[in-house]
Image: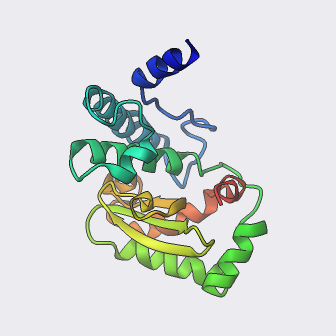
Amino acid sequence: MNTILMSLIMMTMTYEMPKLPYANNALEPVISQQTIDFHYGKHLQTYVNNLNSLVPGTEYEGKTVEEIVAAAPDGAIFNNAGQVLNHNLYFLQFAPKPAKKEPAGKLGEAIKRDFGSFENFKKEFNAAAVGLFGSGWAWLSVDKDGKLHITKEGNGSNPVRAGLKPLLGFDVWEHSYYLDYQNRRADHVNALWNIIDWDVVEKRM
């Protein structure tokens, strides 16, 4: 009976919006309430709605977004699952007044080991985010051996696709910053460091 019940639960899985741990205006001036209202409230909601309409009746029914992103071929299901996963990680990594300005513990040590220093890591990460052509994401991820990687992911892709575990992601689709920064992507990227909740990111390590 328990197995049947669990199967039914899995078959009726729906994908939901993440609950923001801050008010829509709390990240100002880095990210305005207007951008949160559109980016979180409309763009992400559309990806969630699309995924919920696309998955039923397919082999991905009952799968987590991570499982879908890792296995699905390029196409509508992958694109929407990727953006649901990406935005969940993105919006939950921020805090209005972070407790610290850089990571500590295991993540802090790994950054110093793999990039030389936190400042050098930021420089390399900024270069990836600003240098990505078109729409996409810059990610810090960790592999199964504990080594950190900075990758550029086009459109809605995610490092999960390559067997990596995403830790920190910067969205460089224009809808994530254009209302606040217009075409000044570099200014947007530089400002994001002021609202990273490193306690959250460290727990993903």
Front position in the image: 69 or 113: 69
Query: x and y percent of residue 80 in the render?
Result: 31, 43
How many numbered marks appear?
Answer: 0
Q: Is residue 184 visible?
A: no
Q: In the image, is residue 88 above or below residue 190?
A: above
Q: Tell me if residue 62 comes above or below residue 147 in the rendering.
A: above
Report the residue at 35% width, 77% height from top: 131
Would residue 103 appear left or right of 34 to someone viewing this image? right
Between 106 and 9, the one nearer to me in the picture: 9
Q: Is residue 138 above or below residue 47?
A: below
Q: How is the image coloured?
A: rainbow
- Residue 149 shown left or right of residue 201 in the figure: left
The x and y percentages for residue 164 are: 49, 64
Q: Is residue 2 left or right of residue 52?
A: right
Residue 24 found in image quarter: top right
Q: Residue at x 55, y 11 (%)?
A: 1
- From the image, which quarter does the C terminus lie in? bottom right
Which residue: 60% across, 84% down?
120
What x and y, as percent, mark residue 116?
Answer: 65, 88
Q: Is residue 69 above or below residue 139?
A: above
Name the outermost residue toward the left.
75
Tell which of 143 and 51 is nearer to you.
143
The answer to whether residue 198 is visible is: yes
**Residue 57 lies in what quarter of the image?**
top left
Q: Residue at x 40, y 42 (%)?
A: 84
Residue 171 lies, in percent from the top left, at 42, 58
